[in-house]
Image (tube, rainbow, N blue to C red):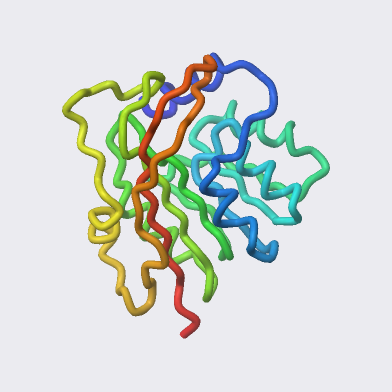
Amino acid sequence: MSQEFWEKHYRAQRGGEKRANPLLVEVAEPLPPGRALDLGCGGGGDTLWLARRGWHVTAVDISRTAVERVQARTAGLDVLGEVHDLDRSFPEGTFDLISAQYFHTPYEMDRPRVLRTAAHALRPGGLLLIVDHGSTAPWSWNQDPDAHFPTPAEVADGLGLDPARWPVVRAGMPRRRATGPGGQTATVTDNVLILRRSES
């Protein structure tokens, strides 16, 4: 059901180049290029932004349509596209940066387990960047007024990682003015958690 939902979602999307998520840009811009993993690559804005700056990017999504479009948009760049239901499989390799931007789905998924797997796939010194919705935008697929958006501290606690091996680099809830797919704007909250794998 999850794969069908996201296939339908991406097939319905218009073409054109997608923007990179602003928090991915903020975090990755000062970093030297390395190996990056884009979990739930979607429209490919983050993958394209990273690859243009010299990163080797593995772009992963449950939707084959999304992955194929990302590969087409990044032709000639160092990008590997892979289709994964992350509840069942995870890309091989280790990474300097793993980005999970708005890694939500309306269907059941063991998200903490997936993110723990991601943390273990970091190279020493590597960063796991988790950006979640902290509020509902007018264009969000989840319009439940009673929806609970876990805080960065709640997300970190749910991962159950050893803080000595994966210390928190940043945990915050910044607000920003966002633009939706139809051009509408709204002020939204992002829940941001960054973990670093220790060198030892």
Query: Within the image, what quadrant is residue 157 found in?
Result: bottom left
Measured from the top left, where is residue 88 in percent x and y? 40, 46
Which residue is found at the position 42% from the left and 67% from the top? 169
Q: How many marks?
A: 0
Q: Between residues 63 and 169, which one lies in front from this camera angle?
A: 169
Point out the image quarter for the N terminus: top left
Q: Position of residue 32 (x, y in %)?
A: 68, 66
Determine whether, in the image, residue 165 is placed left or right of residue 143: right
At a point 83% along the width and 42% down the height, the residue shown is 76
Query: Eyeballing the image, is 66 above or below 174?
Result: above
Position above or below: 38 against 105: below
Pinpoint residue 178: horizontal percent, then vertical percent.
Answer: 48, 30
Q: Outermost residue toward the left?
A: 146
**Residue for point 54% across, 22% down:** 10
| Identity of the residue drawn at 64% across and 62% down | 30
Q: Residue furthest right?
A: 76
Q: Is residue 74 left or right of residue 150?
A: right
* Residue 84 rendering spot, x and y as whole percentages: 50, 42
